Image (cartoon, coloured by chain):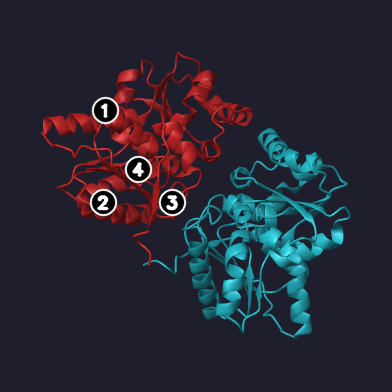
Chain colours: A red, B cyan
Amino acid sequence: MIGIFDSGVGGLTVAKEIFKELPDSQIIYFGDTARLPYGTKGADFVKKYSKKITEWLLKKHCKVIVIACNTSSAWASDYLKKEFPNVPIFEMISPAIKATALATKNNRIGIIGTPGTIRSKAYEKKIQNSAKVFSQACPLFVPLVEEGLLNDKITTEAVKRYLSPLKEKGIDTLILGCTHYPLLKKEIEKYLGKKINIINPAESLAKEVKKYLEMNKIKIKKGSAHQFFFSDEPYNLEKISKACLNKKVIPIIKDPFNG
Amino acid sequence: MIGIFDSGVGGLTVAKEIFKELPDSQIIYFGDTARLPYGTKGADFVKKYSKKITEWLLKKHCKVIVIACNTSSAWASDYLKKEFPNVPIFEMISPAIKATALATKNNRIGIIGTPGTIRSKAYEKKIQNSAKVFSQACPLFVPLVEEGLLNDKITTEAVKRYLSPLKEKGIDTLILGCTHYPLLKKEIEKYLGKKINIINPAESLAKEVKKYLEMNKIKIKKGSAHQFFFSDEPYNLEKISKACLNKKVIPIIKDPFNG
C-alpha cells in the first residue's frame, strides 16, 4: 500500500494525483489534524511528528511513503530518508523543481506557500543559482480553501494581493508550494494569465512515484478499501474531499501519538 | 501570580484587559502554539491539554487561572473547576453573558467565534431561553488578525460577509466569542454601526477577576517580570503583542508536554 501523510486534509490533492497516475492503488492516508497546521510550527516539531507518522504507516504495511505536506517535505524529508534508508520516501519539492526547470524559459520563478515552507527556503536551496527565485507566503489561502471559498470575491482579492509582487517581477513559472493551493488554481490562473506556467508539485510527485514503482517492479496492493486516518476531527473534510476526490471520505479519527 | 492560557497569541487581548484592571499584577502566559488552533479540535483534546496547562501553571505558583481561550472555556472550564476545586478558575463565557444581559434591550443577541466555539453552543447553553441567540462561525478572522490585516479591504469584506446575516436578524448586542476578535472591533463597529453593543468577554472577565481578588483579599505578586511561554514558535507575535500590549514580548519557547 501507499502511505500518504499531511498535516491535515490538503494532502488529498496529492492523493488525487496518485489515483490519476496509479488508479486502483490502495492507500492509507494520515492527516495530523491534532497538530495542524505544520506551516507555523518549528523544524524540530515537524521532524518529530513526521518520523512518528512514518513509523506508524510502516507498521500498517505501507511499502512506499509519500510526504504530501510541503512543510514536512521542506524540513523532514532528508531526515526521514536517513532514518528509514530502506524505504522509498517521496517528497513534494524535488519533483516540482525538475518540472519547473523544464517549464521556465526566462529562469524567473515564483514560489508560494505557507509561512513555514517559505521561511525554510527549501525550494530556493534546491534551485540554487540556476534561476532567480521570488517567494511569497500566503497565510490566508489555507483558510480560504478550508472555507470552501474557491470561487469568491475575497479569494480573488487575496490572490491579487499575494501574487501581484510576483507578477511584477516578471516570473514565467509559479510553484504551488502548499497542498491546498491546487484548489485555487483557477483563481490563480485567472489573475496571472495563461502565459505563466503553474506547477502543481503533487502532479510531478505522482509521476515520479509511478516511474519508481515501474522501474523497481514493485507491486502495490490494488483495491478501493482506502483508509483515511486523522488524528483529530478534520475541519470541512466533506467539502475538500469532494473537491479533490469527487467523493465523500469517511474519516477514521485516531491519534496514535497521544494517550 | 496570575496564570493565563490560550491556544496561541490571541489570549494577549485578555492579558491587556487584566493589566487594565489590575495594573502591575505579575502574569505567566502560556500559549499552546504547538497544538493550535483549538477551534477546530475535538472536546476531549481541548480538555486534556487545558488540564495539563493548568497543572503546569499551578506548579509555577500561579494562584489564579484565567482561561483566555473561548474554545477551552466552552469545553474545558467545568471540567477544570471539578479537577481543581480549590483554585479560582476564570473563563470567558459567564462574565460575557452577564454583560450581555445588561446591554441588550431587544433580547436579540449575536455571537461570533471559531467553528469550535460555535459548534459547542457554549454561549447559547448559558443564555438558555432568556434571549434569542444567532451565532456565526468566522474562520477567516483569526488568520486575518494574524496577518495583521486589521484595517484592510479583505477584512472589511469578510466582516460584511460574516456579519450581514446577524445584522439582518436585528441583533442589538454582539459577543466577540474569540480572543482575536477584539483586534477587529473597529472594522466590526464600522459595519454594524454604533447602535449595536459589542461585548468583549476579556473586559468582563478582567473585571470579575479584580472583584474576586478584592472580595477574597487575595494579593497578587506585583511586578513587571511577566513570562510569556509558547509551546512552539508563535507566528507574528511581534505584530500582535504590539497591537495588544503596545510592546514587544520576548517569548520563551518550551513545550512541557512533549519530550
The alpha-carbon separation of the residues under discs 4 and 2 comes to 20 Å
Which badge, 1 or 3, comes first in the chain's sequence? 1
Q: Assess disc 4: are there few (<14), some (14-19) or many (≥20) residues with their C-alpha within 10 Å of its C-alpha.
A: many
Which badge, 4 or 2, comes first in the chain's sequence? 2
Identify the subunit bearing mark 1: A
Assign the N terminus of chain B to one quadrant of the image: bottom right
Q: Which residue is mark 3?
A: A33
Residue type at mark 3: give it. Thr
Residue in the image at 49% along x and 23% along y: A186
Q: Which residue is mark 4?
A: A74
The alpha-carbon separation of the residues under discs 2 and 3 comes to 16 Å
Which badge, 2 or 1, comes first in the chain's sequence? 1
Is label 1 in contact with label 3 (beta carbons under 8 Å)?
no
Residue B62 in the image, given as x and y percentages of width and height: 60, 78
Depth-wise, is mark 4 or mark 1 nearer the camera? 1
Is label 4 in contact with label 2 (beta carbons under 8 Å)?
no
The alpha-carbon separation of the residues under discs 2 and 1 comes to 21 Å
Residue in the image at 74% along x and 62% along y: B128
Residue A124 seen in the current view = no
Residue type at mark 2: give it. Leu
Residue B251 in the image, given as x and y percentages of width and height: 54, 61
Residue type at mark 4: give it. Ala
Number of marks: 4
Residue type at mark 1: give it. Glu
Is label 2 in contact with label 3 (beta carbons under 8 Å)?
no
Q: Assess disc 2: are there few (<14), some (14-19) or many (≥20) residues with their C-alpha within 10 Å of its C-alpha.
A: many
